[in-house]
């Protein structure tokens, strides 16, 4: 029953999925944090840029962004992100697209964390004479980070699922393998169950673990 | 402008802000300069590539039919997923474990699987076990994938909506002798529906965005795939076609997002209600195990 699996690189495909997810997660955490810093910062121009970026990017389908990185950036404008063979180029383009898209949600998750800190906290901190850096570093941000864990975990899970969109430009991850297996083998239900199981294994523990962490560190109010 | 993060600014902070603004402006200008330079080098700013979008032909032949298909798939998905989601959501709140547990498993399972995987499964399923013509199959598959995923997300929204109501509502209903069915039908659901509206509208954004997967992977001829067809027809104007399509998606989704936000603010203000609202970002927090987002990712 499971014999046909020997002909396919199931673990390899899910390894690609994991690589896409991890690289994009790190990238979008960095770019998303920068965006969040711009959006809550005191410089009006940066605030405007952050707001515009988030509102534009999160309203474009990820599929459009990823297809554009391949058809537009790569094939039309010749951006290859320092890679030579098609596979590596497409992989890097997919990571780029995922980062550009996911960072807008990371930004919103972090901002929602900052918004949960009551103004009274900062006011009290200023009243006892803490400097700006102390207010931020000792009072506001520690509380903000702790309530960002759960929203960020949700973004991460969505990102893991979104890596399948890279199938649109032919990155050999789990969804592409699933399509290939369905075309060649007459085992539709079994194949779908295996792929579905793979994603449940990736997302469910992540959600449970980070949900637990989020509850543990959350500031009780 | 001040916030929880910083005070009203003095002279030094103001000077620093001006410097930061200038530096940022220069960086932004350099980026734009590079983008336009590259576009120009590759001949993508030629008027001939953009001109078709100022004639009705491109709109009536490619864009409008594509948009219609996008909206059709999204609308079908919502209409089918809504009742399913309501049933699953209410089942998860049942007093009987044998109703609660299967509903929970179904919801958590479909929330943890990518929509694309569900769509690919749907496509093969319709090809193998039904005699839906191969022209209609992509639509069926896209709607199936969207329904399976969004029914489980809507189930969480419904559950969060019912749980968001003050406890006094069900206590009062039970005190005047309503049965469980009546309590749900007459007291909780009507109030929960209004409370859920913002979250449901913002879920529409996710559905509209996910239809694009059908165009890219399942050969469903929606808005995104019309961009591909156009660039073939009008001579490799990929950049122009994608810009137009992206703008349409942005306009559509931005309208939906703003509407959801307006609804949420309005409901929070309303004096007659219980004040319970499932906000645009609340559904995911209500999930017990948090398998996935109910939000707009």
Image: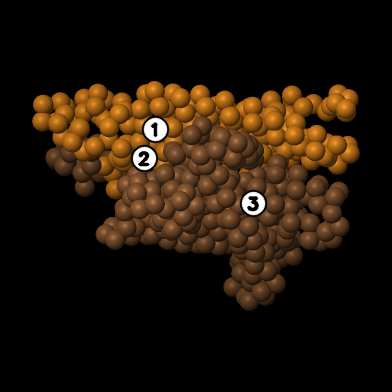
The answer to the question of whether label 2 and label 3 lie on touching residues, with beta carbons closer than 8 A, is: no
Q: Which residue is mark 1?
A: A148
Residue found at the far front of this picture: B177
Q: Which residue is mark 2?
A: A112
Q: Residue at point 14% right, 31% down?
A: A124
Residue found at the far bottom of this picture: B56
Q: In x, y percent, where is residue A125?
A: 16, 29
Q: CA distance from mark 2 to mark 3?
A: 29 Å
The answer to the question of whether label 1 and label 3 lie on touching residues, with beta carbons closer than 8 A, is: no
Q: CA distance from mark 1 to mark 2?
A: 7 Å
| Image chain in brown | B
> In the displayed structure, does residue B273 sit left or right of residue B41?
left
Mark 2 and mark 3 on one chain: no
* A137 versus B242 height, above or below: above
> In the displayed structure, does residue A65 sit left or right of residue B189?
right
Task: Answer with the quarter of the image where residue A147 lies.
Answer: top left
Q: How is the image coloured?
A: by chain
The answer to the question of whether label 1 and label 2 lie on touching residues, with beta carbons closer than 8 A, is: yes
Q: Which residue is mark 3?
A: B147
Around disc 2, counting alpha carbons within 10 Å, would you say few (fewer than 14), some (14 to 19), or many (20 or more)? some
Q: Residue at point 68% right, 69% down?
A: B65
Callout 2: SS: helix
Callout 1: SS: helix
Q: Chain of mark 1?
A: A
Q: Residue at point 37% right, 55% down?
A: B264
| Image chain in orange | A
């Amino acid at each position: 029953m499971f014999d046909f699996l020997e002909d396919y690189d199931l673990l390899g495909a899910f390894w690609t999925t994991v690589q896409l997810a991890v690289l994009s997660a790190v990238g979008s955490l960095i770019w998303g944090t920068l965006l969040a810093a711009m959006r809550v910062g005191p410089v009006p121009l940066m605030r405007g840029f952050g707001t515009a970026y988030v509102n534009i990017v999160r309203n474009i389908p990820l599929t459009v962004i990823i297809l554009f990185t391949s058809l537009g950036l790569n094939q039309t404008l010749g951006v290859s992100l320092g890679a030579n063979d098609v596979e590596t180029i497409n992989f890097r383009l997919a990571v780029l697209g995922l980062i550009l898209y996911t960072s807008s949600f990371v930004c919103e998750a972090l901002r929602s964390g900052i918004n949960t800190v009551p103004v009274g906290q900062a006011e009290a901190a200023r009243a006892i004479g803490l400097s700006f850096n102390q207010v931020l570093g000792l009072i506001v941000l520690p509380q903000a980070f702790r309530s960002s864990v759960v929203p960020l975990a949700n973004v991460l899970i969505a990102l893991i699922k979104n890596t399948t969109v890279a199938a649109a430009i032919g990155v050999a991850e789990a969804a592409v393998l699933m399509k290939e297996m369905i075309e060649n083998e007459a085992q539709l239900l079994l194949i779908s169950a295996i792929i579905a199981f793979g994603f449940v294994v990736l997302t469910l523990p992540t959600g449970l673990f980070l949900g637990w962490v989020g509850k543990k560190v959350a500031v009780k109010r | 402008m001040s916030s929880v993060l910083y005070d009203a600014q003095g002279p030094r902070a103001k000077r620093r802000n001006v410097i930061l603004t200038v530096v940022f402006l220069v960086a932004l200008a350099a980026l734009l300069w590079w983008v336009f330079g590259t576009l120009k080098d590759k001949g993508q700013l030629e008027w001939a590539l953009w001109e078709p979008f100022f004639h009705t032909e491109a709109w009536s032949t490619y864009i409008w039919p594509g948009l219609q298909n996008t909206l059709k798939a999204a609308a079908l998905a919502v209409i089918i997923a809504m009742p399913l989601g309501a049933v699953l959501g209410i089942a998860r709140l049942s007093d009987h474990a044998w109703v609660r547990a299967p509903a929970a498993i179904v919801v958590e399972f479909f929330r943890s699987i990518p929509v694309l995987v569900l769509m690919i499964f749907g496509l093969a399923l319709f090809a193998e076990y039904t005699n839906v013509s191969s022209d209609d199959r992509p639509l069926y598959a896209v709607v199936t994938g969207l329904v399976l995923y969004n029914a489980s997300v809507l189930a969480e929204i419904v559950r969060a909506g019912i749980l968001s109501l003050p406890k006094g509502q069900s206590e009062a209903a039970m005190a005047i002798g309503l049965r469980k069915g009546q309590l749900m039908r007459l007291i909780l659901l009507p109030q929960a529906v209004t409370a859920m509206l913002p979250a449901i509208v913002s879920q529409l954004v996710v559905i509209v965005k996910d239809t694009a997967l059908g165009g890219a992977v399942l050969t469903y001829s929606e808005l995104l795939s019309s961009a591909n067809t156009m660039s073939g027809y009008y001579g490799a104007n990929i950049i122009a076609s994608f810009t137009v399509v992206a703008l349409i998606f942005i306009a559509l989704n931005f309208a939906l997002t703003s509407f959801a936000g307006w609804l949420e603010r309005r409901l929070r203000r309303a004096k007659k209600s219980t004040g319970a609202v499932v906000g645009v970002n609340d559904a995911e927090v209500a999930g017990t195990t948090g398998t996935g987002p109910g939000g707009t990712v």
